[in-house]
Image (tube, rainbow, N blue to C red):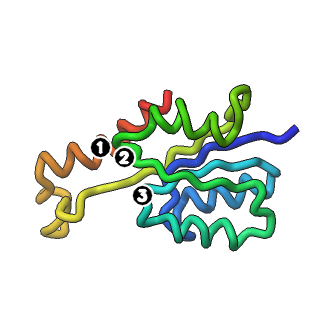
Amino acid sequence: MTRTALVLGVANKRSIAWACIESLLEKDFKIVFTYQSDRFAKTAENLISSKSSTASLVAVSCNVEHEIPELFDQRLTKILGESAKIDAVIHSVAYAPPDAMKDGTLLGTSRESFLKAHDISSYSFLELA
């Protein structure tokens, strides 16, 4: 029986999320993975084409700050079908605004940058539930 995994947060071939995908592929999972925005679409395509069994991989753009409900309500249903289930979820989303550590230390981070980083990197995990 084929198992399905949802992996959120692939940025490139050095991503923890991508290492998880490689491990799941060895265990014959079908994988739907997300990347942040259209800017990462070509990278996602290249990652998929780097694998011999591309039938097991589907990439979806998902800005976790705004699109998690849509991911579950529309995109995954379209990809997996109405009755499909997800057997594993890996949340590997990390983000901080470019100015978050402008002086090179965490202590220089503004409240706004800190809250934005946590909203995207942490709160998005809660939205999955």
In screen coordinates, is 122 left or right of 106?
right
Report which residue position mark 3 lands on.
37
Q: Is residue 125 above or below residue 36?
A: above
Report which residue position mark 1 lands on.
118
Label 2 crowding class (10 Å Cα cut-off): few <14, some 14-19, many 20+? some
Q: Amino acid at mark 1?
A: His
Whole-number angstrom distance, CA of label 1 to CA of label 2: 5 Å
Is the Cβ of the residue at disc 3 closer than 8 Å to that at disc 1? Answer: no
In screen coordinates, is 64 left or right of 16?
left
Dot 3 lies on which element? loop
In screen coordinates, is 36 left or right of 3?
left
Whole-number angstrom distance, CA of label 2 to CA of label 3: 15 Å
Between 75 and 63, the one lying in front of the other is 75
> Which residue sits at x=88%, y=38%?
1
Dot 2 lies on which element? helix
Is the Cβ of the residue at disc 2 closer than 8 Å to that at disc 3? Answer: no
Give percent across and percent down for residue 63. Answer: 40, 48
Report which residue position mark 2 lands on.
121
